Image (cartoon, rainbow, N blue to C red):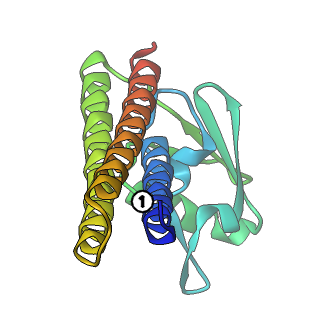
Amino acid sequence: MNEEVQMALSEAEEGMENTLTHLRAELNKIRTGRATPSMLSSVMVEYYGTPTPLAQVANVNTSDARTLTVQPWEKSILQEVVKAIQNANLGLNPQNNGEMIIIAVPMLTEERRRDLGKQAKSVGEDSKVGIRAKRKDANDFIKGLKADGLSEDDAKTSEDKVQDLTNSYIKKVDEIVAAKEVDIMKV
């Protein structure tokens, strides 16, 4: 197999790996009923006139499975942090005690768990579309090489390798989404 085909395969694999990384990041945003600091990763706080990620202006910790604590480094921005958490539409109600912010994470209802499971599946489907797009790019490149003189057998072998790679990554997406669904449905 020539270098160009090998390059197309490695580019496709790299793109598929990036898609998996993105999938994991998106699934981390879907809450499971347990308090995790990553739940607040999308919160932006107005800090001296600049939108700043919460993690850059405060420590975010879990004191137990249902409680998050946010300790800003400057007490003067406590109200800004509370406002940012409320504006993030995460369904959380932050309580300011003058020293830190305490957030009680509510239990998920059965219906909400099902909705979150559907959301996880949707994110998984989007990832599969991304993986298939990488497959199409690689196959198009191989077809271009075929027009430039790559043998029919080498082209077919290369396309089979791209399909095997695609199948393995689609399987990984299914496994990651299934694990997240189990996590969401756990009470």
**Element class at badge 1:** helix
| Residue 155: quadrant of the picture | bottom left
Front in this rendered view, residue 17 or 140: 140
Residue 148 spot, x, y in % from top left: 28, 78
- Residue at x 39%, y 46% (from the top left corner): 161
Q: Residue at x 30, y 53 (%)?
A: 153
Q: At which x and y percent is residue 156?
A: 28, 51
Q: Is residue 88 visible?
A: yes
> Residue at the right extreme?
73
Image-quadrant location for residue 117: top left
Which part of the image, by quadrant, shows the C terminus? top left
Residue at the extreme bottom of the image, as rendered: 49
> Viewer-proximal residue, 141 or 102?
141
| Position above or below: 158 against 35 | below
Q: Residue at x 27, y 38 (%)?
A: 119
The residue where tag 1 is placed is: 12
